[in-house]
Amino acid sequence: MKTLLSFVFCVTSPLNFCVVFTVFAEFSFTCVIDLVSALEHDGFLSGFMDFYQKTGEPYLGTAYGIMMCYWDGIVHFIMYLMMIQCLWNSKSYRTLGLFWAGSLFANMSVFVTGIVVGKFGSDIRPAFWLNMPFLILPIWGAIKLFNKPKSGPTLGGYKAHYDQSFSLIWRPTDLLLVLLLLGAMAFTLFRGLVALDSPLEACSTYLRQYEPYIKDPVGYPKVMMLHFMFYLLPMLGAFVYGLIVPGCTWMPDWTVFVAGGVAQCQWAHTGASIHPRTVTPFRIPDEAFLAVLTANLLYAVIPLLIAWRCTSSINFFLTGYVIK
């Protein structure tokens, strides 16, 4: 009976409901395929993806491709199920949806660009174009979610007025987050210069002794560092501004979107830099392993902390004081 009522509701409800539900269901199926692909490439399974591995998308067998498939097969799959449940129960999935959109868009923008500019760029096969829907749909989803009215308050009252009356120096949590953001900005710029073959001695030393994976010929790490420098760096600067100046209503949504993208990218980048499929000269050197791993984990955690701060206590980011 519940299934019948759901079908009737889907048919009689706006087209948007059916489209979103169909997208989530279809993408959930592809998540299972990606997980099977990763498990087979790592030797845990056999006989499922042999034909596609040889004739379809050989770059899925790279270390980056395998780590990307693990993220898609586990993290994205869980998010799809959660969003389907929210859709089924008519609950809001705005925050989760923005995290998913940021994660999938960052995933596919690096993946698709890396294929074209990396060592696989001379062997583009028809199966490559199957990635286009996964690049376009998160953009569509993000636009829909950004334009969707927020379920929480948008106007501040006495509590918002009180929270916004404190300068940054009297908000130790925000002050710490600003310092972490400034550190992340410096690290982003530095690794971007490394990817661009800067002649600075510090860049050469870092590439040689800490993260040689940035110059892996597969192309993904270099593309990711450039994405971070040209797109993430301005956003981190905007977040610094949003933590200093009250009333930036865009902060909760954008911090969640960016946190999803950075989490996915850092998972794939860090995992690929230590994966056995990456040849030894491009893996993290043993003597620098702990330092590089810590830096990459912290780099992934900082946007998550910012997103948590902005979504858990939104008074500072409300606008318009309603004082009666």
Image (spheres, rainbow, N blue to C red):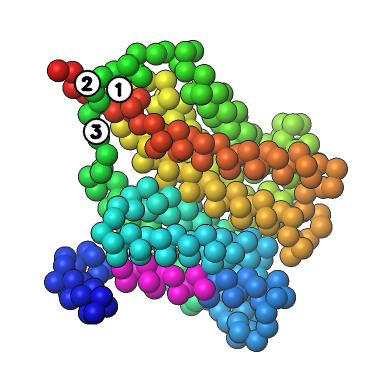
Q: Circle 1 sits on which residue?
A: 160
Q: Amino acid at mark 3?
A: Thr
Query: Which residue is at the far right?
Result: 287
Q: Amino acid at mark 2?
A: Tyr
The x, y position of residue 82, in whole percent, is 41, 60
Q: Earlier in the sequence, mark 1 or mark 2?
A: 1
Residue behind mark 3:
154
Q: Point out which mark residue 275 bears.
A: none
**Image vertical order of residue 90 relative to residue 241, above or below:** below
Quarter of the image for residue 159 reads: top left
The x and y percentages for residue 313 are 39, 31
* Residue 179 quadrant: top right
Residues under numbered marks 1 and 2 in contact, where contact means CB atoms less than 8 Å apart: yes
Residue nearer the viewer, 131 or 114: 131
Q: Which amino acid type is marked by label 1? A: Ala
**Which residues make up the magenta segment?**
21-32
Q: Earlier in the sequence, mark 2 or mark 3?
A: 3
The residue at the point 47 percent across, 18 percent down is: 171
Q: Is residue 318 magenta?
A: no
Instruction: Determine the secondary structure under disc 2.
Output: strand
Between 128 and 235, the residue placed more toward the observer is 235
